[in-house]
């Protein structure tokens, strides 16, 4: 029997309850929070409304001002932006650098010290810093482990607030906390080439030639195609072909520039930006004119705080110069990342620029057809644009004329680990890692013997020193289960009778992937966490690990999950003695 009991509530009683409610349903906006947010965002409230795509920028303003994101402040932000509180909350909780505080939770310390714990810094003693600093600094300073902050050549590296520096010791971190300042590193004190010097050296003449029609559009694209320049963020798509594809799409067209550089071991973009920002700016403006770009969005990682000041100042200088020359430049906006490795993936970066969670899109459609704000989008890595001026001035043959072992072009290798001279080394494409160590890095550190290397950052795999004669370039490493990616080379050694164990490196990298997975697809979200558990066992279950790796590679939505198994597979294949 299925008897149903109906309880009748008089309509008058319902109406009386509705009248007695003093506020609408949902979280109410605190008056004090409303006033604080109004004061903070007053200058950004153009034409009486705030832009939805700037949600992450507004969250940064709140975080910078109050040291965290409280529920009242997020509710007030949602109200003034006329979006749901859930929308604000889901974006804020997605990014590592936002400290979201629920009602009743303790407010975090105003100052946070982030200690990089990824591979290069781990080998240099990051765990020692993480163990000692909390008790020394006390409860007023929060010390947390963090992923790569782009200073691998200066390992171990830390961020004290927004100030990143390398070669960190307990003493230098304590001094930085106490003085709210740091002793500038070599990168921060390097004097960059300003506009005046750049113009004296012939800068922006190529842009003028393109804009004034002295250099034809078709000839410019052809020169880029003949140079063989490929995307230097990791994907390696031919640059000239990309320009031609996006130019063929109906306008308006947009550009998105990736300076997120979150791949562990990679720091080349920061290196060039700190030294020669106008070379990148000119390359970006040339690409914009050739392709017919109406607006460009530059996505800069949050850890590069001092680079942001350089970029803002020099872009303003370039705009003033363009006005004097009576040429029109596209709108350029700089967007600040918030600590999400996944936003290095082009569609995830576009989602973040639009003020959303940085989750990769399913493809097709590709971003060249439907990208930023639904428009055809030219997406480029910083270094790719850095080379545009040189290629157009010196010719495609100049660039393609470099190379070794049958390869063509130049590569900026970010080298870290057990070498005497880590850093960014410009070398011919196709150079081997042994040649790179001997000719550019001053050899191995004293007492260290070359044992293994990562040829392409965290996701590029791990190879033994016995395979150090493979040319380093696009397409040369895939037969060995690796790839060059952004050319981040991490050198491991065998010293004092003990190796920088490849199995430990694989575990370190998989913990990074597990922490950075966006969680959108099950194979990556669950697979990376399960892999960490399996890698922590004394004896690896190689059959189970291979099944898991295959599932992640086949079924993950984007490159994070697809490439995450590479270190595991390489260790199983080349370092079996460490896992048995």
Image: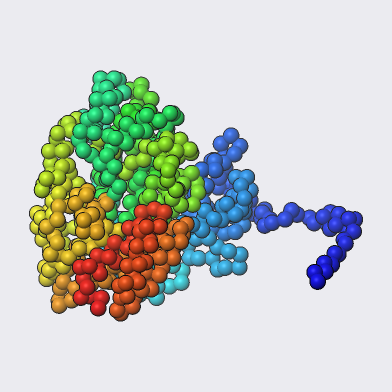
Q: Is residue 421 visible?
A: yes
> Which residue is at the front of the view, 135 or 263?
263
Q: Nearer the viewer, residue 281 or 160?
A: 281
Residue visible at 57% across and 52% down? 87
Q: Is residue 577 left or right of residue 117?
A: left
Observer-nearest of 406 and 411: 406
Residue 310: x and y in percent read: 33, 43
Q: Which quarter of the figure has residue 19?
A: bottom right
Instruction: Inspect this view and state whether residue 319 appears.
Output: no
Position of residue 334 measured from the top left corner of the image (x, y, whole percent): 41, 42
At which x and y percent is residue 490? Answer: 22, 60
Q: Position of residue 55 (x, y in %)?
A: 52, 47
- Quarter of the rendering containing residue 319: top left
Residue in the picture at 22% in, 30% down? 223
- Where's the N terminus, which quadrant? bottom right
Farthest front residue in view: 1
| Quadrant holding the C terminus | bottom left
Q: Does residue 447 sit above or below 489 in this rendering? A: below
Give the total number of marks visible in the rendering. Answer: 0
Please name whichever residue, 186 or 26, is drawn nearer the observer in this view of the structure: 26
């Amino acid at each position: 029997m299925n008897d149903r009991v109906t309880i009748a509530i008089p309509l008058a009683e319902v109406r009386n309850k509705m009248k007695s409610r003093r506020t609408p349903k949902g979280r109410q906006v605190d008056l004090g929070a409303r006033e604080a947010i109004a004061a903070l965002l007053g200058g950004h409230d153009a034409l009486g409304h705030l832009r939805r795509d700037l949600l992450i920028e507004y969250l940064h303003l709140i975080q910078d001002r109050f040291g965290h994101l409280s529920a009242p402040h997020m509710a007030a932000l949602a109200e003034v932006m006329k979006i749901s509180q859930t929308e604000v909350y889901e974006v804020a909780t997605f990014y590592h650098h936002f400290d979201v505080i629920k009602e009743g939770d303790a407010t975090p310390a105003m100052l946070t010290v982030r200690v990089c714990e990824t591979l290069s810094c781990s080998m240099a003693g990051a765990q020692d810093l993480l163990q000692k600093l909390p008790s020394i600094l006390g409860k007023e300073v929060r010390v947390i482990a963090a992923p790569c902050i782009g200073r691998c050549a200066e390992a171990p590296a830390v961020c004290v607030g927004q100030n990143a520096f390398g070669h960190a010791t307990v003493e230098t971190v304590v001094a930085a906390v106490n003085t709210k300042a740091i002793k500038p590193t070599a990168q921060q004190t390097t004097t960059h080439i300003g506009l005046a010097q750049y113009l004296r050296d012939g800068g922006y003449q190529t842009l003028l030639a393109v804009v004034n029609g002295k250099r034809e559009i078709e000839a410019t694209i052809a020169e880029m195609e003949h140079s063989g320049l490929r995307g230097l963020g990791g994907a390696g798509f031919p640059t000239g072909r990309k320009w031609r594809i996006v130019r063929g799409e109906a306008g308006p067209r947009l550009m998105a520039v990736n300076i997120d550089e979150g791949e562990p071991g990679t720091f080349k973009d920061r290196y060039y930006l700190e030294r020669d920002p106008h070379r990148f700016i000119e390359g970006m403006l040339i690409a914009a004119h050739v392709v017919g770009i109406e607006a460009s969005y530059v996505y800069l990682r949050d850890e590069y705080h001092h680079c942001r000041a350089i970029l803002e100042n020099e872009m303003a200088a370039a705009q003033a110069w363009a006005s004097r020359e009576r040429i029109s430049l596209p709108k350029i906006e700089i967007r600040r990342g918030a600590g999400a490795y996944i936003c290095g993936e082009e569609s995830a970066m576009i989602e973040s620029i639009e003020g959303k969670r940085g989750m990769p899109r399913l493809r097709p459609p590709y971003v060249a057809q439907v990208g930023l704000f639904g428009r055809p989008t030219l997406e480029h890595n910083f270094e790719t644009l850095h080379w545009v001026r040189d290629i157009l001035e010196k010719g495609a043959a100049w660039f393609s004329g470099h190379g070794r072992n049958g390869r063509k072009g130049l590569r900026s290798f970010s080298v870290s680990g057990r070498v005497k001279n880590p850093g960014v080394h410009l070398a011919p494409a196709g150079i081997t890692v042994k040649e790179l160590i001997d000719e550019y890095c001053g050899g191995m550190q004293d007492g260290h013997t070359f044992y293994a290397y990562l040829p392409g950052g965290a996701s590029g795999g791990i190879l033994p020193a016995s395979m150090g004669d493979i040319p380093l370039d696009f397409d040369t490493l895939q037969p060995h289960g690796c790839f060059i990616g952004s050319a981040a080379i991490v050198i491991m050694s065998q010293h004092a009778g003990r190796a920088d164990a490849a199995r430990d490196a694989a575990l370190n990298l998989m913990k990074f992937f597990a922490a950075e997975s966006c969680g959108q697809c099950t194979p990556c979200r669950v697979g990376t966490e399960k892999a960490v558990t399996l890698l922590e066992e004394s004896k690896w279950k190689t059959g189970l690990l291979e099944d898991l790796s295959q599932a992640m590679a086949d079924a993950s939505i984007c490159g994070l999950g697809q490439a995450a198994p590479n270190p595991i597979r390489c260790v199983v294949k080349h370092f079996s003695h460490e896992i048995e």
